[in-house]
Amino acid sequence: MTTVMVLSLLVAGCGVDGGVRVEGPAPSARPGPVYVMAYMGHPLQRPERFALSEFSSMAKVRWRSWGGGSAVGVGELSGTWCLPGCEKNGIPATITLSGLEWQERVGYYSRFDVQGRGVPQDLVDQKLEVPRA
């Protein structure tokens, strides 16, 4: 019994001086900023207007959410498919960005979906460009 107690004390004392030491703040739950890549463009955060494709774009976007697994915004959709008639004001639409991918502490949405009356099918559940490391 005495031998077991001595061994327990020796083992418990191991690593006290040479053990792992953790310093500094804990990593944040969210690694960094989140972006959307405009068609043939640069990374944007909460853009008010941006191109979705060579034929369609969103304008006057007000974001209801941003930075989580998905981002939702409401604005005006326009494109060559609605000419003439939508040059000045697009059609009301809701855009949802999803498929958040993280690269080096920076997030990029990889998919988009636009919903609204008269939205072309090629703007439903589509891929977005994401930079590749």
Image (spheres, grey):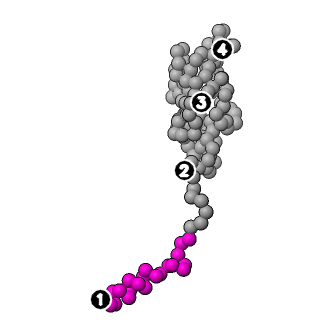
Marks 2 and 4 in Cβ contact (< 8 Å):
no
**For the residues marked 1 and 3, what is the alpha-carbon distance in whole angstroms?**
68 Å
Contact? badges 4 and 1 (CB < 8 Å)? no
The three-letter amino acid code for the residue at tag 2 is: Ala
Amino acid type, mark 4: Asn
- Between 100 and 33, the residue placed more toward the observer is 33
Badge 1, how many Cα within 10 Å: few under 14, some, many 20+? few
Q: Which residue is mark 4?
A: 89
Point out the tag, 2 or 4, that comes first from the N-terminus: 2
Label 1 secondary element: loop
Region in magenta? 2-21
Q: Which residue is mark 1?
A: 1
Residue marked by disc 3: 63
The kind of secondary structure the magenta stretch mainly shows is helix
Q: Which mark lies nearer to you, 2 or 4?
A: 2
**Residue 69 appears in the figure:** yes
Residue 122 lies, with reference to residue 127, above or below; the image says above
Residue, x 57% and y 28% (percent of image)?
Answer: 73
Marked residue nearer the N-terminal end (3 or 4): 3
Disc 1 marks a residue whose amino acid type is Met
* Residue 47 place in picture, x, y as percent: 66, 31
Q: Identify which amino acid the numbered label 3 is placed on.
A: Trp
Quote the CA–CA distance across marks 4 and 1.
86 Å
Please check the rendered image and state whether residue 16 is part of the magenta-colored stretch, yes or no: yes
**SS type, badge 4:** loop
Q: Secondary structure at mark 3?
A: strand
**47 lies left or right of 4:** right
The mark that comes first in sequence, 1 or 2, is: 1
